[in-house]
């Protein structure tokens, strides 16, 4: 019998949790996005939903997988780690069957029962008779970390993989991982994932970006399937005590401190079971997990960046806000090109002067040939009245790159904020937040969340290739925490580019990667300098905890863009414009929609 009652009960629990934590309006928008993606699951029906049909069209045939397996040069052995505690036999048996049904058969399953009291699961485990399945029974419940470590001690494979006791691997999961090991030999591998409910319906896929260290510090986006070289897990000390519910997040962070050889497989290889006792079905089922996740990240950033770093909770469950130290002597130079339009510039300047909690800044207004008497008078007055404001004459044909480069030459700052004149600051701590990120030795360019006048998203990171060239993902959507089928717009993450409307770069980065390319006349150089920073080995960051209002019209169509800008964009963007080209946007997502959707 189809368990419709349980399905809606779990949905209602999620709604209640969201309202209590985030409020009614954000929850309403989340429900709207959920219904849009799952409309074929909300009605009584028989047959496959749209996502399951999408999966079926892309499934790997067993004969093709086995044909390729025969050609492998290496045959890694996977030790699958499964801690078990009081799980229903039907879910446990299906989880184990998903291992035994693998196309790639070089595996062992290491099960540790952590003192279960449910007789049916214990009896099932005792009756397993498979030489590839090892089972250990603990007399007491010691917690998931210690149970997992016992399973790792039982492991003899070259790699360990992690499987929860009620989840499923796809049949091609280990084959896909073994193929990557043969091709690239990474130390740490993770895949995309989805949810599976009690009716065996798969839904809500999560198509992840490639390795994004700042996203992992904000949220455990890696989760499952994750596979790590056993020697690396052992050298890291396995799972640590005190992080139950976030033990995998803690381990992943410690592993990434030891290796940069991290590979993402853009395929759904793992399904989380949605039941009331799992975080997939009920985010509040493990109340300590949220706090333990915060502690894991705090320990990590202190180890990596120093003891002055700190991590706080955000308003969202399992989402964290990492802060880095900023010396109060740091000077921030805010560079704003303008021509007339004091109606836009004045509220922009006033918002900076009134709102900015970080005091050590200067504003450099690049006057690009203002001709109106009122504009000239206002510029003279603001220059005379405020010691933090300087007006620099830039009386030449408009070139966004040159204006910013000349602003850099006139600036005294350690950090440069390149800001449009049609913006208004919302977040008081915007300067310190953006500057502290930009000054990290591993960071190139940083950008905030930009909102249209109506409160919807204008910028939450640039995807190169979106719309053919480059565009803003989530554009026009509500700024709510909702993650499927891509990351949430409300989490800090690494991006290939951020918009030049508010773009923050440290002086040390400009000295490393160079100035803006002045061959670009109107647009494109903001993305190009981000690409240059990325190719220099730096990470670019989108920070949603900083909000800026941007009065750009949603329907504005750029006009009079010279051919040279398109030619240069083609030259510099070319490698990233095809599906899968931008490493921070999953190849399974459409490049024709700013709202994330499957291709």
Image: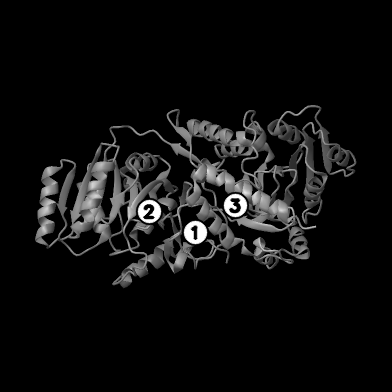
Q: Residues within 10 Å of mark 1 (few under 14, many from 20)?
A: many
In this picture, is 2 found above or below 56?
above
Tag 1 residue? 582
Residue 429 at x, y percent in the picture? 34, 40
Q: Is residue 234 left or right of residue 572?
A: right
Q: Which is more toward the observer, 498 or 565?
A: 498
The residue at which mark 3 appears reads as 264
- Residue occupying image coordinates x 54% and y 32%: 295
| Observer able to see residue 254 | yes
What numbered label is drawn on residue 450?
2
Question: Marks 3/2: CA distance?
Answer: 29 Å
3 or 2: tag closer to the N-terminus = 3
Q: Is residue 42 left or right of residue 306?
A: right
Residue 326: quarter of image: top left
Snapshot quadrant of residue 240 = top right
Does the image show residue 584?
no
Rendering coords of residue 397 (x, y %): 19, 65
């Amino acid at each position: 019998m189809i368990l419709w009652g349980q399905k809606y009960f779990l949905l209602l629990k999620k709604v209640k949790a969201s309202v209590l934590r985030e409020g009614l309006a954000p929850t309403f928008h989340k429900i709207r996005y959920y219904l849009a993606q799952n409309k074929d699951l909300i009605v009584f029906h028989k047959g496959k939903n749209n996502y399951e049909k999408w999966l079926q069209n892309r499934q790997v045939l067993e004969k093709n997988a086995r044909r390729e397996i025969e050609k492998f040069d290496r045959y890694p052995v996977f030790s699958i780690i499964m801690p078990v505690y009081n799980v229903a036999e039907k879910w446990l048996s299906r989880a184990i069957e998903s291992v035994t049904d693998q196309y790639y058969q070089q595996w062992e399953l290491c099960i540790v029962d952590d003192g279960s009291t449910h007789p049916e699961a214990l009896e099932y485990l005792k009756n397993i008779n498979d030489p590839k399945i090892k089972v250990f029974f603990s007399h007491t419940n010691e917690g998931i970390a210690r149970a997992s470590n016992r399973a790792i001690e039982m492991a003899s494979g070259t790699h360990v993989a992690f499987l929860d006791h009620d989840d499923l691997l796809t049949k091609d999961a280990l084959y896909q991982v073994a193929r990557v090991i043969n091709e690239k030999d990474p130390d740490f591998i993770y895949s995309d994932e989805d949810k599976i409910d009690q009716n065996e319906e798969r839904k809500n896929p999560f198509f992840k970006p490639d390795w994004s260290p700042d996203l992992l510090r904000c949220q455990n986006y890696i989760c499952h399937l994750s596979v790590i070289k056993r020697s690396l897990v052992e050298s890291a000390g396995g799972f640590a005590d005190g992080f139950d519910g976030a033990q995998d997040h803690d381990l992943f962070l410690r592993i990434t401190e030891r290796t940069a050889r991290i590979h993402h497989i853009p395929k759904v290889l793992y399904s989380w079971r949605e039941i009331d006792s799992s975080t997939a079905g009920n985010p509040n089922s493990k109340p300590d997990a949220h706090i333990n996740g915060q502690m894991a990240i705090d320990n990590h950033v202190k180890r990596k960046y120093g003891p002055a770093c700190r991590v706080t909770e955000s308003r969202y469950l399992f989402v964290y806000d990492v802060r880095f130290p900023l010396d109060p002597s740091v000077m921030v130079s805010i560079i704003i090109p303008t021509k007339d339009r004091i109606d836009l510039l004045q509220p922009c300047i006033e918002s900076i002067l009134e709102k900015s909690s970080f005091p050590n800044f200067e504003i450099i207004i690049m006057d690009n040939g203002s001709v109106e008497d009122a504009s000239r008078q206002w510029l003279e007055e603001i220059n005379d009245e405020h010691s933090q404001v300087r007006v620099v004459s830039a009386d030449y044909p408009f070139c966004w790159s040159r204006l910013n480069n000349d602003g850099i030459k006139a600036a005294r700052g350690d950090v440069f904020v390149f800001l449009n004149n049609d913006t208004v600051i919302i977040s008081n701590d915007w300067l310190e937040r953006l500057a502290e990120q930009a000054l990290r030795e591993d960071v190139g360019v940083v950008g905030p969340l930009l909102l249209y006048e109506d409160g919807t998203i204008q910028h939450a990171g640039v995807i190169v290739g979106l719309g053919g060239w480059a565009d803003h993902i989530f554009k026009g959507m509500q700024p709510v925490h909702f993650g499927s089928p891509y990351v949430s717009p409300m989490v800090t993450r690494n991006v290939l580019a951020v918009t030049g409307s508010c773009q923050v770069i440290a002086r040390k980065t400009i000295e490393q990667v160079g100035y803006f390319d002045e061959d670009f006349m109107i647009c494109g150089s903001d993305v190009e300098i981000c690409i240059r920073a990325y190719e220099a080995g730096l990470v670019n960051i989108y920070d949603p905890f900083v909000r800026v209002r941007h009065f750009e019209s949603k329907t504005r169509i750029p006009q009079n863009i010279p051919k040279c800008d398109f030619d240069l964009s083609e030259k510099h963007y070319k490698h990233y414009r095809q599906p899968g080209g931008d490493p921070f946007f999953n190849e399974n997502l459409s490049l024709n929609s700013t709202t994330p959707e499957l291709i």
